[in-house]
Amino acid sequence: MTSANSDAEIPERVIELRLPSRLGYEKVAMDAASSLAKRMGFNGERIEALRTALAEAVTNAIEHGNAHDSAMKVLVMLTVRPDELSVTVADQGRKQLDQDQTTLTPSLEETFEKQDKGGWGIWLIRELMDEVEFSTGPSGGNQVRMVIHLEK
Amino acid sequence: MSTPAQQPSIELYFPSELGYEKVARDAVAAFARRVGFEQERIEDLKTALGEACINAIEHGNAQAPGLRIAVSCVCEDERLTVEIQDDGLKHYNGHHVPVPIESKLRGLAPLRGMGLMMISALVDEAGFTDSPTGGNVFRLALYRRRPVAAQ
């Protein structure tokens, strides 16, 4: 039987990273995550997918959530479990993400017409990761949790 | 809408377990690249940081489970500083005398234990510094241009 004490033995490891809200620093999160994912045994293709999804999530946090205010931090939590890597990106919520935006699929036709080709980040994150969940963090910031499963 | 120019900085916390220092090395290397350091210097910084983190895991935190190591980086104009902090279960006493390399090569002493010497050779500043919380804080710094005195 598992005792209550064994809760302390949950094989979970957390790496926490705080970044300034300036473009370019998303690379720090991408390199930390790929280093960790490689160590966990993910293949190159999955690692590239993770890098892309994380780049989108962190640049969203910098540009939108923290509105380029470099004094505001982006918090990235990497949680290692035996069969998955969970990545949470949280901003300080200078601007709240419209929850409707988190489920829309942008239209290709409209994007062709528009000057601004942006707006595909969230869709891309959903395409690339196994689990994606948008929420509002305890202090009111935007938060996205992305999980990739380790297939053995 | 311009905020005063700030010194870019990052903070990283990782489990005090061998292997995780690689994640810290890669994160700090990406930071150093972003603030414009050359790849060659970054390689030296990575090696020095890896050693410093291993010291923190093995000695400062005495390999106790459940602890973390904190790494912070800040870049001022010409200087990149990295601080590695542990919980100080064991304190660095500063009286460690390195064993001569000859003894190590002849198998008379363990091969490990050259970390601090190697770190000093790789970066422009290295040493323990005061800690407000009681753990060991080891500081590394890299200058964009090597100090003239180093030649």
Image: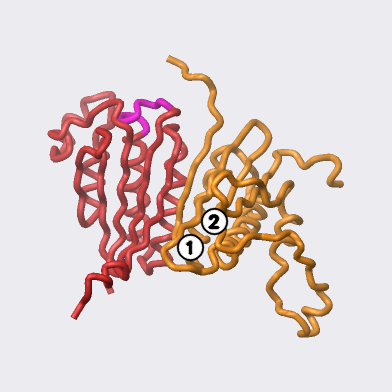
Chain colours: A red, B orange
Q: Which residues are magenta?
A: A62-69
Going 70% across and 51% down the picture, which residue do you hit?
A: B127
Label for residue A147?
none
Which residue bears the numbered disc 2? B86
Q: Earlier in the sequence, mark 1 or mark 2?
A: 1
Residue B25 in view here: no
Host chain of mark 2: B
Going 20% across and 54% down the picture, which residue do you hit?
A: A131
**Amino acid type assigned to the residue bearing label 1 in the image:** Ser
Please provide percent x and percent y for residue A64: 31, 29
Please provide percent x and percent y for residue A51: 37, 51
Please provide percent x and percent y for residue B116: 71, 61
Mark 1 to mark 2: distance in Å?
8 Å
Q: Between residues B32 and B80, which one lies in front from this camera angle?
A: B80
Badge 2 crowding class, 10 Å Cα cut-off, few under 14, some 14 to 19, many 20 or more, is many
Please provide percent x and percent y for residue A1: 18, 81
Which residue bears the numbered disc 1? B16
